[in-house]
Image (tube, rainbow, N blue to C red):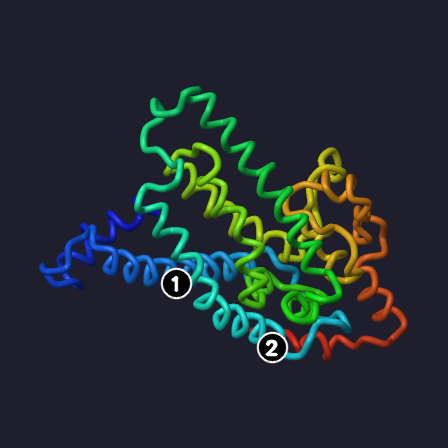
Amino acid sequence: MDLVLNVADHYVLTPYVFPASWPEEGALRQILSLLVLTNLGAAVLYLGLGAISYFFIFDHNLMKHPQFLENQVRREIKYAMTSLPVISIPTVALFFYEVRGYSKLYDNVHDSPLGWPGLFLSMISFLLFTDMCIYWIHRFLHHRLLYKLFHKPHHVWKIPSPFASHAFHPVDGFMQGLPYHIYPFMFPLHKVLYLGLYVFVNIWTISIHDGDYRIPLAITPAINGSAHHTDHHLFFDYNYGQYFTLWDRLGGSYRHPSALLGKGPHDLIRKLQAEGKLGEDRGKGRGSKEE
């Protein structure tokens, strides 16, 4: 995060925001700067990537599904934009320790004992480590003593849109994001790669809520895509994983996507329309309200 902070200091914060008496390395200034940058970055990534997915990838036909809520997209955005500033507070504490040099983030490839191969290995290990942690955190949040308090708000969206991706209770959102932040305190990671992975994580989180169930057949058994995650929203106790299906298979919580078996949300919509139980006007009416 110090790369982003340094750029912001150089071009904006030092010349235009903070007085000269506030040094760039001052703790208070760094905390305030990180708080602003974290909230701004989160909003830009969420709204920007979410909008791209919503307008160009998300199948708006899903709005006809009986479990797609009235004004759902607006409600998802409102909930996320209310939660993100709260999530940013403990997140900034972790970013502050990164900036202060307590993490194992490094600047140059030569600082890695494995050089360029180490860069590739750290990327793989980041995905495997965070996928494992998120699986267990996610499953833990489904415990009956915690679910209603923290995770239930995210399961309101039975048929999610891309904007449901960040629509979490703040405690839920921070806990599921925690593995991304603790990884660089445990393992060496290049700073630029860390930023790239942070953006990728946001893209992936949106993609598994985008309603695009297409996935190459060869990787369907291994990759946790939108079809898998939609079944998690619908059937609750399955497909907790983030990127891969490995831990769901090991934990006995894997479910082959119903959308890939002809029993998914689109199939229900077609069935209801064929039976005359779901008119076109209803679907269009919902779509117009959301857009």
Name which quarter of the figure residue 232 lies in. bottom right
* Residue 173 falls in image quadrant: bottom right
The residue that disc 2 covers is: 288
Tag nearer the camera, 1 or 2: 1
Residue 94 rendering spot, x and y as whole percentages: 41, 52
Name the amino acid type tagged 2: Ser
Q: Is residue 43 left or right of residue 74?
A: left
Distance from disc 1 to disc 2, alpha carbons, whole Å, reads: 30 Å
Residue ID for mark 1: 39
**Front residue (pair 249, 139):** 139
**Crowd around label 2: few <14 · some 14–19 · many ≥20 (10 Å):** few
How busy is the neighbourhood of tag 1: few (under 14 within 10 Å), some, or many (20 plus)? some
Image coordinates for residue 219, horizontal then vertical, percent: 71, 35
* Residue located farthest toward the right when viewing the structure as drawn: 275
Residue 224 drawn at (x, y percent): 69, 45
Q: Secondary structure at mark 2?
A: helix
Outermost residue toward the left in this view? 20
Q: Nearer the viewer, residue 162 or 11?
A: 11
